[in-house]
Image: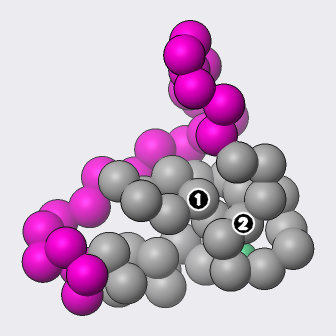
Amino acid sequence: MYCVCKQHVELALDKFVDEYEDAPDMVNLKDTEFSDWDPPRQCDMCEEPAEFLVV
Ligand SMILES: [Zn+2]
């Protein structure tokens, strides 16, 4: 699973496919409320705020 900013979505999708050999789902963090989990606030690959979850 990756939490990434807009610039790193493509990279995260590539990495996900490499690592898990499965099609990733992309979740927009702004559109989603998690009742029992707080997503990381920061991109996994840079200092920008995370906007998408690749799962
Ligand atoms: Zn980033």
> Mark 2: is the Cβ under 8 angstroms from ligand 1?
yes
Give the class, few, some or many, for how many residues have Cα within 10 Å of label 2's Cα (few <14, many ≥20): many
On the image, which quarter does residue 32 sit in? top right
Disc 1 marks a residue whose amino acid type is Cys
Image quarter for ligand 1: bottom right
| Depicted 8 relative to depicted 35: above or below | below
Residue shown at 57%/26% (left/top)?
37
Secondary structure of the residue carrying numbered label 1 = strand
Whether residue 48 sits left or right of residue 26 in the image: it is: right
Q: Are discs 2 and 1 less than 8 Å apart at CB?
A: yes
Quadrant for the N terminus, please: bottom left
Q: Is residue 27 magenta?
A: yes
Residue labelled with disc 2 = 43
Residue 41: image x %, image y %?
Answer: 78, 49
Residue 48: image x %, image y %?
Answer: 85, 68
Residue labelled with disc 1 = 3
Q: Is residue 7 visible?
A: no
Residue shown at 49%/85% (left/top)?
11
Disc 2 marks a residue whose amino acid type is Cys
Give the class, few, some or many, for how many residues have Cα within 10 Å of label 1's Cα (few <14, many ≥20): many
Whether residue 21 sits left or right of residue 50 in the image: it is: left
| Depicted 34 relative to depicted 15: above or below | above
Residue 33: image x %, image y %?
Answer: 59, 19
Spatial CA distance of label 2 from label 1 is 6 Å
Residue range of the region highlighted in magenta in the rendering: 17-39
Q: Is residue 29 magenta?
A: yes
Secondary structure of the residue carrying numbered label 2 = loop
On the image, which quarter does residue 35 sit in? top right
Q: Is residue 47 visible?
A: yes
